Amino acid sequence: MKRRLLLLSFLLSTITSAQNSLNQILDSYENYFELPRETLFVHTNKTVYLPGETIWFTAYLYDRKENVSKSTSTNLICALFDESGEKVEDLLLNVENGIASGHVQLPKTISGEQIFLKAQTRWMKNFKEDDSFTTRLKLVSPLTTPHSELSADQRLNGQQIAIMPEGGHLVAHTVNTVGLKLLDGPKMNTSMSLRLFSENGTVLVNSIQVNEDGIGKFEFIPLLGQTYFLEGQPKNGSKILAKLEKAKPYGINLSVNNLFDDKVAILMKTNDQTLKEIKGKDHFLAIHRDGLLTLNAFQFEDTEHSIMISKDKLLRGVNIITVFDANLNPIIERLIFNEANLNTVRAKVSKIDTELKRDSIGLKINLYSKTQTNARLSVSVLPEDTESTEAEQSILSALLVQPYVKGPLKNMRYYLKNIDRIKKYELDNLLLTLGWSRYDWSNIFDAPPSEKYKLEDGFQITGKVLNANPEKDKYLTLYQKSHPQVYQTDIQDDKSFKLDNVTLHHGEKVYAALLNRRNKTEEPEITMKIIPSYKNKNISLSESFLIAKNKSVLGEEEEPLPVLTQEDYLVDDRLIALEGVTVSEDKIEKKLTHRPIGIIDAIFDGLKITTEEVKKRPTLQLVLQNLGYRTIITPLGNSIILPKNGTPSVVKPPVIVVDDVVMYNPSRGINNLPPNLLNSNTAGIDEIHYTHHPIEMGNRAVIYIYRKYGRYVGDKPKERFTSFLATEGFQRPKQFFNPQYANFSSPKFKSYGTLHWEGQLITDEQGEAEIMVPTLSQKGAKVFIEGIADDGTLISDYQTVSFE
């Protein structure tokens, strides 16, 4: 009886000890991921650029726990770096609903073969793991050194082999699975194979196949003290050789079979010598990611222990498998990818069944989504012969895989698009070669992150109104013409004020007015401070991206792009193409001084509002009627502007842009037209640029209105205000425009040009959206689409569309 009680007491103690260990792992893991983490992806309009061109891009922020587009921060820091890692330019973007769009112009003097665009938030600096996003872009420059003239130290090194035993190390006298990856050489041919042999020349594995990325795996039983070698012979290259690490006498290894449709088989193996030491001792299997973790305690009763797990029990996408010993030391780790129930959809692009109008064509995008939800897309339309290929990362790889691995990845689009059994096998091999995840368990147990950097939501403005009378004056009002939001705050007894979460556009005027209790305004005398400050944005390029010329992220040599002369691609800045005739800009400079964003030559016309024009047509309504538009003023004073022909129920009103800010575009839900717009005094307008031909989303024409400095469209308000220049703030959004190519039919435009870019295209609940694309003498286009739906569905696709 006493013996039974002692045995029962021992079993209860063992169970309690195991439970305590499980709780310790769970508590440490949940604590480490308690603070919300942001993941980034940046989609650029293309991957190859010329000096002087503009990079157009859209950034997506993603919540990996909730699997939705979500931004804990609204302030996104972006920077452009040259090939040497020197910062060329930086900017700040405003993130709304998890998405931000921006642009950065390349200097005309930039040289090299590659450039880098990086995005991050300050909140990300709270974590040891780098959640910023960097994309590598190619540069075709007249100043670039031709590939054939590279010096010896610039040339590529010989072939190398990276070897990664599954789980992290080789264990003697048991079956080991080993992954391999070929580096620093030309892209592999799938016919190439390697062989494994021992130090005495015995061939153990005669034919190890690799895919086009040079990735493969093999199995063998290493003997203690023996040295093993991998040898391969590329089709057009020298023989390559690599030595494997020696096997350890003690240890546990891992073998995962992830090829089943509905389950994953996990096999843990050891040798007889290790089994004597660990038999009957607790081990712990953790499957985890992003603060979500499941734990199982187990014991080795034999040299093998297997576990089958349903894929329905796993997280979608990457899962991290970690095995702990009895002392909670992580001893094995491996990444797997669960493709079951992956929340992704494809896109279909088709021509709209309408007449081709003035060198433009309509395209319809349809998402194959089973849910009724809106989606936000970024869409790049390039000539069908473009040199710009798919980017190294897609929104799928950037959000589903990159956050869990060490270092940047390449060619992930291939592995995540149309996943079949072969791609599952290749993707699993890739993850095997990446080894352990980027999360260090010593940090998880002992060094959880702390909130050193606060979440940023716009700007805070603090200050004093020096001429305020607290007994009479009630509010201070601030606004910018480039943003529809008007901010209002109370004035305190000490004349101080504070505004939180303010959206400011950098370099734009901020207008301030003092409002008294009778709702009358007067000009305030104010002192103020804007925080946070971004004058030093403190953003740099990671060393992992500063790689040798003509190497990809995985070290593969790429075909060099042709070197161009300056005359090859862009027209002289002093010249403007107009209706097929080239004239000096000096001759028209006195007439038109604005360059509207979005103008394509020979489509837009411009009108300078002169004194004579003001006398003839004193209101905007008369000017637009003279330009061929039909105008209607409703009984409520609202303005309706229509093209020449058609009725309001059939013809879509044009987009209205005032000072490069979109004020009216129903296709995007924008309607900020000032009241009585058509009755505005023409004397306050400087220029009007217009087209009757649809070029915008939703088959709409565009009218640009530019106001005279210090004047308003409409009557000048009688209220008094003061103004100051915002030295801090976000980049003001602009519409895409094409650079001045000398000839849209030239091979250079076909190789490097952009037909159209939509930074933020919103679909309807059926997943459909339409865009208008200028054909620019092209016969077809490649359409690249990235995006995310409101329910978290990810979209990544590209298609070729014929214009004929």
Image: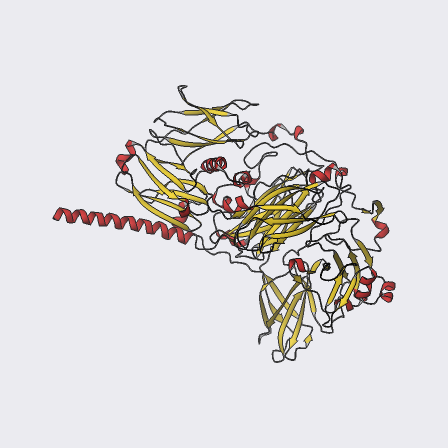
Q: On the picture, is 10 further left or further right than 173?
A: left
Q: Is residue 491 above or below residue 773?
A: below
Q: On the picture, is 701 further left or further right than 182?
A: right
* Residue at image point 29% right, 48% down: 18
Q: Is residue 157 above or below residue 357?
A: above
Q: How is the image coloured?
A: secondary structure
Q: Tell which of 712 and 689 is nearer to you.
A: 689
Res 283 seen here: yes
Residue 525, by quadrant, is bottom right
The outermost residue toward the left is 1
Res 447 seen here: no
The outermost residue toward the top is 201
State the count of labels: 0
Q: Quadrant of the C terminus?
A: top right
Q: Tell which of 422 and 196 is nearer to you.
A: 422
Where residue 272 appears, x then y in whole percent? 28, 31
Where residue 499 appears, x then y in whole percent? 58, 67
Q: Tell which of 590 and 746 is nearer to you.
A: 746
Q: On the picture, is 600 further left or further right than 285?
A: right
Q: Is residue 491 above or below residue 100?
A: below
Where residue 203 appears, x then y in whole percent? 41, 21
Where residue 486 appears, x then y in whole percent? 64, 67
Q: Tell which of 63 and 644 is nearer to you.
A: 644
